[in-house]
Image (cartoon, rainbow, N blue to C red):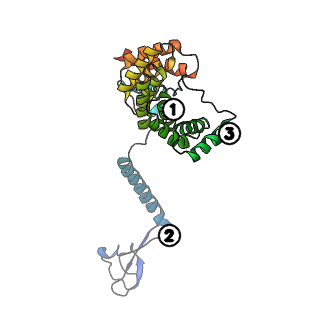
Amino acid sequence: MTVEAVVCVSCGAKFRATHARCPRCRTPVAAAQRPRVRTETASSGRPVAAVLAALVTVLAGLWLYGREPAPRPTGPASGPAVRGPAPAAASIQTAAADTPVPPDPAFLLSPELPNNDPRPEDAALLARSRAALESEPMDAEALYDTGRVLLRLGRIDEALAPLRQAALMRGDQWPQAFTFAYACALGQRWQDAVAGFRRARVLAPNDAVTSYDLALAQQKLSDYRGAAQEYAAAIALDSSSAAPRLGLAISLDRQGKAAEALVAYQEALKVMPGGPDADRVGARMRRLEGEGAQR
């Protein structure tokens, strides 16, 4: 509760503002003096403070509400609406990722050459051919035999030098030219492989595997047009083999020739055995068919 008091200007006495005269000296109290001195109890300010605090809170809340952005939506249900063909585009991208161009087929060893699998006697053959080279370093046959054995043992980098030298010394011999090119392909030396297979094809133009391996080496260098021509030559020489047909389809596919690639995949599937490779080809065909339907 608030109690107002005044101080007498004559005698200095302090008394309630309700008195018209000073109780001590009876001096009249001027009206302007009455609110000069104001005393409050400790509890009297609490309602006022509470009201002020509430008012500040309300004003702050209104200020923040006007400045803060709307809450960010969470969960798929509150996401932005998708308009137009976006779902179809997303499905196309997913399908493309799920059905890529099938992997390149493997290089083939021509049936005109001896089997390239490791043999129990390879260690002895290698020792014998190297002994021959110690006595005659330019022995073309010993160089070729050394390279062949190293190739069968999987030591490709070691096989390249003697096979290269043997191919140079026997430039008119298809086995040396083809084997060196084949070793380069296994070592992923594509430029040397292409040059070697071209030389071998000149020496044996009717060997389907030589044309096929040349096409595959060109494909590794992204020469898909040249690869398609060589695959076609290999198919003409051996129409029963699935590998060149698959290689042709892949090279056409990578050129963006979807219609031609689809036909080539269909021809490859006719002679391919069932399995993961055939499944990948079938998936790619369905993908190309779907693209054609959307055009």
Counting every numbered tag in the picture gives 3
From this viewpoint, which residue is outermost toward the front?
135
- Of badges 1 and 2, the one in the foreground is 1
Q: Residues within 10 Å of mark 1 (few under 14, many from 20)?
A: many
Question: Which quadrant of the figure contains the C terminus?
Answer: top left
- Quarter of the image where one finds residue 214: top left
Left or right of 154? Residue 185 is: left
Query: What amino acid does circle 1 point to?
Result: Thr
Separation of residues labelled 3 and 1 (CA atoms): 21 Å
Element under label 3?
Answer: helix
Q: CA distance from mark 3 to mark 2?
A: 112 Å
Front-most of residues 21 and 88: 88
Of residue 271 and residue 76, the one placed in the foreground of this image is 271
Q: Pointer 2: what residue? A: 42
The earlier-in-sequence mark between 1 and 2 is 2
Q: Are marks 3 and 2 in contact (CB under 8 Å)?
A: no
Quadrant position of residue 90: top left
Taking the image as shown, residue 115 lies to the left or right of residue 257, namely right
Query: x, y (%) of residue 227?
Result: 39, 25
At mark 1, the secondary structure is helix
Relative horizontal placement of residue 30, taking residue 183 as reference (left or right):
left
> Where in the figure is residue 4, as x and y percent of width and height?
41, 72
Q: Position of residue 121 (x, y in %)?
A: 69, 35
Residue matched to label 3: 124
In this rendering, the answer to whether 31 lies above or below 163 is: below
Who's the residue at 45% across and 62% down the image? 49
Instruction: Say whether disc 3 or disc 2 marks the residue closer to the N-terminus.
Output: 2
Disc 3 residue type (three-letter): Ala
The image shows residue 150, relative to residue 233, as above or below, that is below
Amino acid tagged 2 = Ala
